[in-house]
Image (cartoon, rainbow, N blue to C red):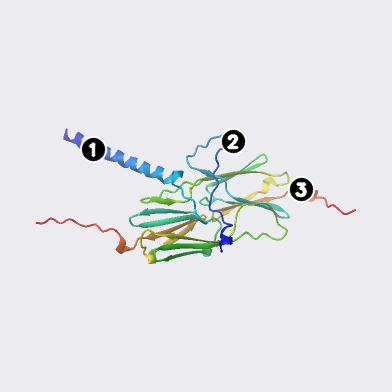
Amino acid sequence: MSDQESTLEAHKEEITSMEDTERTRECPCFIPRADIYELEDRMVIVADVPGADEHSIDVTLEKNVLTINAYVDPPLKEGYTLAYAEYEVGDYQRSFRLSEEIDRQRIEAQVKDGVLRLFLPKAAEARQRKINVKAG
Amino acid sequence: MWRRYYRVPTMWRELERMQREMNRWFEAYSPERLHRAPGYPALNVWSNEEGLVVTAEVPGVKPEDIDINVIGQTLTLSGERRPDRPSDGVRYHRQERFFGKFTRSLELPFPVNVDKVEATFVNGVLNISLPRAEEDKPKKITVKSAA
């Protein structure tokens, strides 16, 4: 049990400074933990954004840079005081540089239970470009 | 004229109330008050006289994989975060999200009404509401006149 528990990390990594730009929202901003994997025909980015839903997530693509922004307002429970805290609530932001082989027109995003999944299909020509290396 | 004097203290009271509210807000979110979570998941506890609300961020955990138990004055939260199972031939470029079983226990400051414990799970955030046991609630004593 203990060795299984050790693989789960409770700590969230906060963004300290973002390339000299200052944030306009007065709540912390975190770097969402992400997995990136590649399948035959697509790349998949999976990111943890607890508290965000389809209305509070922006995914933008500018040139080669794909940026995820998730806005989560820290809850203030009416009539309650926060007696003990181990985590903070705030926004999420992270950017990824895409390779040329991604078909920009067909990128899809989906969010469920606080997990964002981005499906990045590879362009048909990129798939064809792959050259098999034969043993001589 | 009396009306003017009457209104001043009301305004002060209102200001004080606002001040208290703001302090509460700042205190609630100042990082000095952040404790290091001894395990996964990190927990936040909200309280008032009527009970507690315990919250946790457990993205990607399915509601049916979460177990909440209250035994005596101990709340136990356990569950499992299961990995995505992409098809064979998958190549990971980056793997930062972890999976596995987890258990957290929390000692509650007062007995709770176990039958009325409720939990919601929205966007990967768990909210467990634990109403204080009726017999443990502070009692308001009416002062009777001796006449």
Q: Nearer the viewer, mark 1 or mark 2?
A: 2
Residue denoted by label 3: A126
Q: Residues within 10 Å of mark 2 (few under 14, many from 20)?
A: few
Same chain for the residues under marks 2 and 3 in the image:
yes
Where B27 falls versus B63 (above or below)? above
Which amino acid is tagged 3? Ala
Count all numbered tags in the image, as a single digit. Answer: 3
Give x and y (percent) for residue A103: 70, 47
* Residue B81 in view: no
Q: Residue sitting at 41 percent across and 56 percent down?
A: B53
Give x and y (percent) for residue A133: 84, 52
Same chain for the residues under marks 1 and 2 in the image:
no
Which chain is indicated by disc 1?
B
Local SS, label 1? helix
Mark nearer the N terminus (2 vs 3): 2
Task: Tell me whether the residue at label 1 lies in contact with that at label 3, contact meaning CB atoms closer than 8 angstroms.
Answer: no
Furthest-right residue in this view: A136
Q: Nearer the viewer, residue B140 or B39?
A: B39
Which amino acid is tagged 1? Pro
Residue denoted by label 1: B9
Q: Residue sitting at 22 percent across and 37 percent down?
A: B7
Which chain is indicated by disc 2?
A
Local SS, label 2? loop
Q: Quadrant of residue A18?
A: top right
Give x and y (percent) for residue B92: 69, 53
* Residue B73 in view: yes
Residue denoted by label 2: A19
